[in-house]
Image (cartoon, helix red, strand yellow):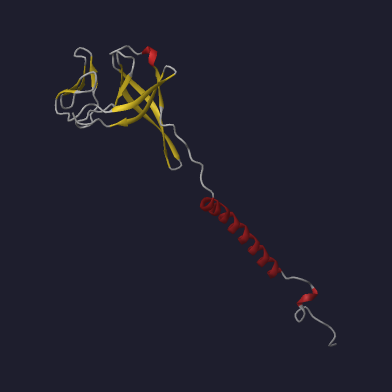
Amino acid sequence: MSELKTTETNPEVYGPTRRAFHIAVVNILGAIIGLALAIPTILYLFVPGKSRKQSGWVDGGDVSKLETGVPVELSFQQLTVDGWRQTTVKKTAWVVKEPDNSIVAFGPLCTHLHCAYHFESQLSQFMCPCHGSYFSIDGKVVSGPAPRPLDRYVTKVDNNRLQIGALKESSEA
């Protein structure tokens, strides 16, 4: 009777146990989850991101429709990128066509306290209603508390289309 082997004394008779199978499944699932977390981390650390080149110029419209010496308030949309988020910002500019066919685009805010100004056609001047600053058609201060001329956008004309660039702060008069 000593030759009779029971499963309690010899577990190799029936092969791997249920416990060994469950441990193997848990280890395989843990390895898959670890690999799924490691791949994006490795890509983030070692692969450089694609650089999004922005031209810096925004299309402002057709310049052939502008009249010489008549300011027009122009609205345009500018794409801004902040990290991975892209947003479209609505901006405005006062655009004036000069007698030599050059285009000047003024920023929409008064240089005193950054209030919105408008064009008074009877006076042929820009007027800030908040504190009474007046600006000539070329952006220079005529009267009021404004410390400097109107800020200007960098502009260029390409194929009869106005291209608007960065807003440059004007120097003091």
* Residue 77 drawn above or below residue 44: above
Q: Residue placed at 23% from the left, 24% from the top?
A: 117
Rendered position, 130 above or below 71: below
Instruction: For the C terminus, give its image quadrant.
Output: top left
Q: Please provide percent x and percent y for residue 30.
A: 61, 61
**Residue at (19% x, 29% y) in the render:** 148
Question: Residue at point 19% right, 14% down?
Answer: 123
In this view, the residue farthest toward the left is: 144
Indicate the quadrant where residue 26 lies.
Answer: bottom right
User: In the image, is 92 to the left or to the right of 144?
Assistant: right
Question: As rendered, which of 153 and 71 lies closer to the eye?
Answer: 153
Tell me: 149 left or right of 18.
left
Residue 22, by quadrant, is bottom right
| Camera-side residue of 34 and 172 | 172
In the rendered image, the quadrant that contains the N terminus is bottom right
Indicate the position of residue 62 as horizontal and vertical percent values: 40, 16
Vertical side of 119 occupied by 48: above or below: below
* Residue sitting farthest toward the bottom: 2
83 with respect to 72 (left or right): right
Q: Nearer the viewer, residue 26 or 5?
A: 26
- Residue 113 place in picture, x, y as percent: 20, 32
